[in-house]
Image (cartoon, rainbow, N blue to C red):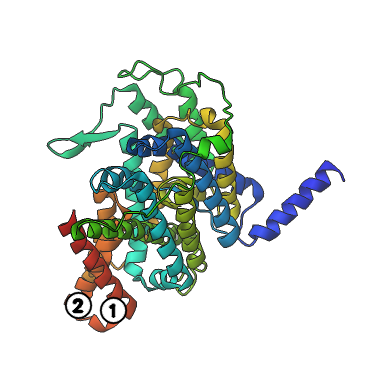
Amino acid sequence: MSTEATKLKQESFLQRKFKLKENNTNVRTELLAGLTTFLTCVYIIAVNPAILSTTGMDVKAVFWATAISAGFACILMGLLTNFPFALAPAMGLNAYFAFYVVGVLGLSWQNALGCVAISGVTFTILSFLKVQQKIVDAIPECIKNSIGPGIGFFIAFTGLSQAGVIISSPDTLIQMGNLSNPGVILALLGIAITAVLVIKRVKGGMLMGILLVTVLGIFVKDPVTGLSYTQWPTGGLLAFDNPITALSPTFGQLSIKGMFSGPAVAVIGVVFAIFSFLFVDLFDSIGVLLGVSTKAGFIDENGELPNAGKALFVSAFGAIVGAILGTNTVTIFGAESTTGIAEGGRTGLTAVTVGILFFLALVLSPLFLMIPPIATASALVMVGVFMLEPLKDIELGDLSSAFPAFLSSAMMPFTSSIDKGILFGILGYTLAMVSAGKKKEITKTVWILTGVLLVYLLLEIFIK
C-alpha cells in the first residue's frame, strides 16, 4: 500500500471516529489545536511536583504521576466523549493538598492521596447515578451564560499576572506592572501580535504567538535573575528514566489508615477535606463544561450538553487514577482547553493529541519546559476575549438574572476560583428569584443545590 493510500485510510478512520466533517473540522486543525492546548498546560508537569514535594513526596515520582494521569485522562476524554477538553492534576487543589490537608490537618501525604481517591470514587458513583448530568442541565440559563465570561476574565487575569503586566499592590490590591521590564514588553508584544493574527484569522495564530515569544525569550534577560527568560536545557532535549523506578515512591501508596481516628474535630476536618476535593472537582468541571461548551457551540437546542455525564465521569475516574499513581485530583483544564478550541479544535482528536503529548513529555520534557510563562500569556488573554460572547444572551435589564450572572462571572476572577463563582451564582439566583416573586420558577434540583452549597459555605466558614 502506498504512503498516500495509507494516509487516506488513516484520515478516513479519524473522520469516522471523531466525526470531523459533522463538526466542521479536519485532522490538521485538531492536531494544531491539541498542540496549542498542550503548550498552555505543560507547565503543570513542572509546577505540580514542586508543590506536592513540600509534603515529602518524591519529585520525580510526582512528575511521572502528573504526566501519566493527565495523558490517560485526556485520551479517555477524547475517545469516550469526543470533546476537545484537556485534563490534568488541578492547580489550586495541589496547594490545598499540600498546605491544608497535610500542613494544617496533619495528615500524611499517603492519607491525603486517600482523600483524593475517596472523593474520586464518590464522584464516579454520582456519574453512574447521572446526578452530574442533572446538575448541568438544571443550572439556570443566566448562570450558564455567565460562567464562560467569568472563566474568561479569570483566564485573562492569570495570563496578565504571570507575565507581570499586572502585579499585586498593598494599597489597591492590583496595579499595572513595570512597563519598562523587558519581560512585560515581550508579553505585551506577544499579545499584540497574537491579536493581529487571530483577528486576521491566521490558522495557528495563538501557537505562533507562543513560539515567537519563546524564541525571543532566549535573547532577552530577566533583570531580576540575570538569566534569559527562555532557558536552553543544559542536559539535552531528551530525558530517559525507567518508568517503574521513577513511579515506585508514590505508586499505590495511598492509604486511609488512621484517617478517621482521633478527636471528633479532627475527623470532621478530614471529612470536610474529602468533600472539598469532591466539591471543587465537581463544580470546576461543571463550570468548565458549561462555560467552554457554550462558547464552542456544544450546547443543544434544549440548552443541554449531551455527553456531559460522560465527561464528568472521565474527570472522576481520572482523579482515582491520579491518586493511585501519586498525584492530586485530576480535573478538566478550562483555561488551557479554550486555547485549543479557539484554534478550531472541536472533537476528541484534540484531547487525544494533548494526551499523547503528555506521554511524549516524559521523554521531551526539557524541550517543553523551555516555554516561559510570558510566552503563554498572549494565548490566555485572547481566550479571555473569546469567552465574553455569552454575556449578550443575559437579560441584564432583569435584575433577577443580572444579579446572579454578575456574582457568577465576577467571583471567579475575584476569588481565583471557578467553583466559588458557581456557588455564589446559584445562591444569588435563588435569593433573586425569591425576592422577585418567582419562587415557583426555581426547579427542585436548584433548591437542592442551594441547600448543599449553603451547607458547604457554612462549613468552610466555621471549620477553617
Q: Is residue 47 left or right of residue 24?
A: left
Q: Which residue is mark 1?
A: 442
Which residue in the rendered view is the most extreme toward the right? 1
Question: From what the image shows, is residue 184 above or below residue 82?
Answer: above
SS of the residue under disc 2: helix
Q: Is residue 116 left or right of residue 318?
A: left
Tag 2–tag 1 contact (CB < 8 Å):
yes
In this orientation, does residue 140 appear?
yes
Q: Is residue 205 left or right of residue 398?
A: right
Question: From what the image shows, is residue 181 above or below residue 440?
Answer: above
Mark nearer the N terminus (2 vs 1): 2
Image quarter of residue 434: bottom left
SS of the residue under disc 1: loop
Say which residue appears at 38% left-offset and 42% top-offset.
381
Residue 203 position, x and y percent, is 57, 42
Which numbered dot is residue 119? none
Residue 110 position, x and y percent, is 38, 47
Image quarter of residue 32: top right
Q: CA distance from mark 2 to mark 1?
A: 9 Å
Q: Is residue 456 left or right of residue 9?
A: left
Camera-side residue of 226 and 29: 226
Q: Residues within 10 Å of mark 1 (few under 14, many from 20)?
A: some
Say which residue appears at 67% left-offset and 59% top-offset.
17
Residue 212 position, x and y percent, is 49, 29
Say which residue appears at 51% left-offset and 47% top-offset.
69
